[in-house]
Image (tube, rainbow, N blue to C red):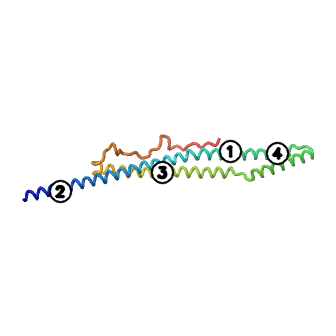
Amino acid sequence: MKKGIIALIAIGGILFLGFFGFLAYYNAYNNAVGLQETVDEKWGNVQSAYQRRLDLIPNLMKTVKAAAKNEKEILTQVTQARAGIVGAKTPEDMELMGKKINTAINLMYEAYPNIQSTQNFRDFQVQLEGTENRIKRERDVYNESVKNYNTHIRGFFTSMFLNKETFPRKEMFKAMTGAENAPDVNFE
């Protein structure tokens, strides 16, 4: 009878260890899947921030350029109209030029009352800075999720359970060669 009890205890122990091993594998696998999906999500957020920059910055630059060009034309017209008074020789010429200038100035101020290009450039800078800050934040969050994932899959027991092809080590964000140089923002 003692041999029967010992055999039952041995079988029970083997089943217990097998069940414990299965639970450990189950837990390690599910955690790795969750962390892997988090890494993929965070990389998608980085890509989304890049797309926002690609969509936003060229349009803002066009808007700022167009506003600056419009204001330049207005100022040129006002300056040329004022210069016409200096060239007037007779009182009639001066009166005619004065009326033209007043009309031109009134029309220009009705159509475009304030010079705004400086504020437009400031607004552009704020948008550019905000966009770059969002991208940096998303990269940092991505790198943090990669660290958590890699730490999990490389753990002592976890690395024994997981298939390295299914759960490969992920690389953190790396800047492109030359990224340490500031980009050229050209308003011409």
In the displayed structure, does residue 37 sit left or right of residue 67?
left
Going by the numbered disc 2, the residue's amino acid type is Gly
The CA distance from mark 3 to mark 2 is 48 Å
> Could you give the CA–CA distance between mark 2 and mark 1, rounded to whole angstroms?
79 Å
The quadrant the N terminus occupies is bottom left
Q: Which of label 2 and label 4 is nearer to you?
A: 2
From mark 3 to mark 1, how far is it between C-alphas?
A: 32 Å
What is the distance, in whole Å, between disc 2 and disc 4 at their CAs? Answer: 101 Å
Marks 1 and 4 sit apart, C-alpha to C-alpha, by 23 Å
Question: For the residue labelled by badge 3, is the local secondary structure a helix, a strand or a loop?
Answer: helix
Badge 2 or badge 1: first in the primary sequence: 2
| Labelled pair 3, 2 in contact (Cβ < 8 Å) | no
The residue that disc 3 covers is 138
**Which residue is painted at 61% across and 45% down in the image?**
59
As measured in the structure, the alpha-carbon distance from the residue carrying label 3 to the one carrying label 4 is 53 Å
x, y percentage for residue 7?
A: 12, 55
Q: Which residue is mark 2?
A: 13
Q: Position of residue 123 (x, y in %)?
A: 63, 52
Where does label 1 land, which residue? Answer: 66
* Residue holding disc 4: 81
